[in-house]
Image (cartoon, helix red, strand yellow):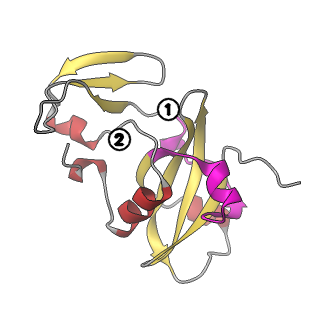
Amino acid sequence: MKKRPKIGDILEMTTQRGLAYIQITHVDTAMGFLIRVIQGHFDARPANPEALARRPTQFVTFFPVAHALKDGILSAAGTAGVPVSDRAFPVFRVPGEVDRSGRVLNWLLWDGNTHKNIGQLRPEQRNLPIEGIWNDTLLRERIESEYTPAKDVL
């Protein structure tokens, strides 16, 4: 029997730019696994998971890790401590009302417990991750494009 994914697990994904690594940082009862994408693309699996985990975070999102492991989209690459900078549950921005053209009219912030309506985003809030659960196609595309939340068009 395979072990269940847990916080600290580092997982490998093949992309067009090389190998990419993600780490599970949290598990939310409603949203599932919160992952951090570790910055960088690699030709081969790094030998030291702890050193890999110390690399900067490119972005965070929710992702169905268990299904991706079962389907072979991800493979286990080790376990390491979650960096101090990623241990606190992040605040997410959440689109509120959206007009017919797709423009977000107001935003909410979600801290893992409550949603707070804030109206328009301040410039520094554009760096906050957007709440959502991504599929493997979107995750791979965002890794390959070196996505960051500030680049998001919402």
Q: Residue under circle 2?
A: 129
Q: Earlier in the sequence, mark 2 or mark 1?
A: 1
The disc label shown at residue 145, or none: none
Amino acid at the residue labelled 1? Phe
Magenta-tinted stretch: 61-88
Left or right of 30: which side holds 123?
Answer: left
Q: Position of residue 95 (x, y in %)?
A: 26, 30
Where disc 2 sits, the SS reads loop
- Give the vertical position of 102 relative to 17 (above or below): above
Which quarter of the figure has residue 124? Answer: top left
User: In this rendering, would 101 be left or right of 67?
Assistant: left
Residue located at (48% from left, 43% from top): 85
Q: Give the farthest residue toward the front.
A: 100
- The percent position of residue 39, horizontal first and vertical second, equals 43, 63
Q: What's the amino acid at mark 2? A: Pro
In the image, what residue occupies the spot 37% across and 69% down?
Answer: 144
Label 1: state its secondary structure. loop
Q: Gap between marks 2 and 1, in whole Å? A: 11 Å
Label pair 2/1, CB-CB below 8 angstroms:
no
Q: Is residue 68 in the magenta section?
A: yes
* Quadrant location, the N terminus: bottom right
- The structure residue drawn at horizontal position 42% and vertical position 78%, both measured from the top left corner, is 17
Q: Is 54 part of what is drawn in magenta? A: no
Vertical side of 28 occupied by 5: above or below: below
Whether residue 97 can be seen here: yes
Q: Which residue is mark 1?
A: 89
